[in-house]
Image (cartoon, rainbow, N blue to C red):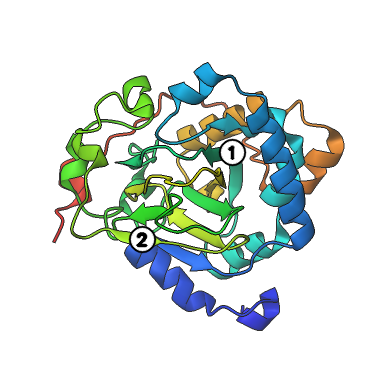
């Protein structure tokens, strides 16, 4: 499929190569203004409902608000422009787990380095096609000053010293109890990814990513959507977990919202029970950083 067939100006073969080789790519201008406006409204309402205690508990990442109670995100999740791009890039058949509203208040410290893959027991975790990818839609223009994304290209396929420093999203690291933790440090191979509101970062869940501190007095908000590409090629155990997790969280969405995400709803019909997930890769299978 060519770039004209999906209706926007990107060389999607190049973008697919970037995603496979570097672990991420950026697609410009991927949101209709009406969806962007609606998503901002949904996000602002969700953030406003949080207590000061809840905000303090996630001081380094910013808010971590599950989409389960926010069906207003359905237009974003089911964005046909993004789904067409994934299909054209060879990441079709993607199924949705959840979205997360991540609003980073200002001022607040940097987010720690982490990778989010939960399926290191799935054979796909050691291939070009990750069991999990993230779609990050930024609702604000991002710079180093307000906490733009930081990435370490290649860490989705190569072992890095950060792999031995702990798992993501534990209470202590989310609070930032020890800002001297190596997961808050600078690394020579990291890159900044400042983008415009409405742009889309597609990333491999296995990739180490973080953010700069938000030094402003304004929130910087991103919606992170977790997709599982080539769903039917995943191990049955993985499919089962994704299916049950989606339906547990989102079966209460109204019908009109579910209709908007229908193409990405996981539908596992087997009998395998959902397994425990595994966030830690096998060092021998992942390979060494060059």
Give the mark nearest the N terminus, 2 or 1.
1
Q: x and y percent of residue 285 in the render?
A: 20, 47
The answer to whether residue 113 of the structure is visible from this angle is yes
Q: 211 or 163: nearer the eye? A: 211
Q: Residue at x 30, y 31 (%)?
A: 167
Q: 177 or 28: nearer the eye? A: 177
Dot 2: element? strand
Q: Residue furthest right?
A: 256
Q: 136 or 120: nearer the eye? A: 136
Q: Residue at x 43, y 30 (%)?
A: 59
Q: Is residue 281 left or right of residue 248?
A: left
Residue at numbered disc 1: 101
Q: 175 or 121: nearer the eye? A: 175
Quadrant position of residue 250: top right
Q: Residue at x 65, y 34 (%)?
A: 67
Mark 1: give few (<14), some (14-19) or many (20+) Cα within 10 Å.
many
Mark 2: give few (<14), some (14-19) or many (20+) Cα within 10 Å.
some
Q: x and y percent of residue 239 in the render?
A: 53, 37
Residue at numbered disc 2: 192
Quadrant position of residue 66: top right
Q: Is residue 277 left or right of residue 283?
A: right
- Quarter holding the N terminus is bottom right
Q: x and y percent of residue 58 in the render?
A: 45, 27
Q: Residue furthest front?
A: 217
Q: CA distance from mark 2 to mark 1?
A: 21 Å
């Amino acid at each position: 499929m060519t770039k004209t067939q999906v209706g926007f100006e990107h060389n999607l073969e190049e973008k697919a190569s970037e995603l496979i080789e570097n672990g991420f790519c950026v697609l410009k201008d991927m949101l209709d203004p009406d969806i962007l406006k609606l998503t901002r409204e949904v996000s602002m309402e969700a953030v406003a409902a949080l207590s000061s205690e809840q905000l303090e508990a996630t001081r380094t990442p910013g808010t971590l608000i599950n989409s389960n109670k926010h069906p207003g995100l359905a237009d974003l999740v089911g964005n046909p422009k993004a789904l067409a791009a994934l299909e054209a890039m060879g990441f079709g058949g993607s199924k949705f787990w959840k979205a997360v509203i991540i609003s980073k208040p200002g001022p607040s410290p940097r987010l720690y380095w982490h990778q989010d893959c939960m399926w290191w027991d799935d054979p796909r975790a050691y291939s070009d096609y990750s069991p999990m990818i993230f779609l990050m839609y930024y609702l604000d223009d991002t710079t180093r000053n307000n906490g733009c994304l930081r990435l370490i290209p290649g860490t989705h396929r190569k072992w890095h010293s950060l792999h031995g420093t702990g798992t993501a999203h534990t209470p202590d690291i989310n609070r930032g109890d020890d800002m001297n933790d190596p997961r808050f440090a600078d690394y020579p191979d990291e890159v900044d990814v400042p983008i415009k509101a409405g742009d889309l970062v597609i990333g491999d869940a296995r990739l180490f990513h973080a953010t700069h501190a938000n030094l402003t007095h304004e929130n910087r908000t991103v919606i992170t959507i977790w997709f599982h590409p080539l769903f039917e090629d995943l191990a049955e155990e993985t499919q089962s977990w994704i299916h049950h997790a989606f339906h547990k969280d989102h079966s209460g969405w109204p019908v009109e919202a579910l209709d908007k995400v229908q193409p990405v709803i996981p539908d596992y019909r087997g009998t395998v029970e959902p397994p425990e997930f595994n966030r830690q890769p096998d060092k021998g299978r992942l390979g060494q950083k060059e």
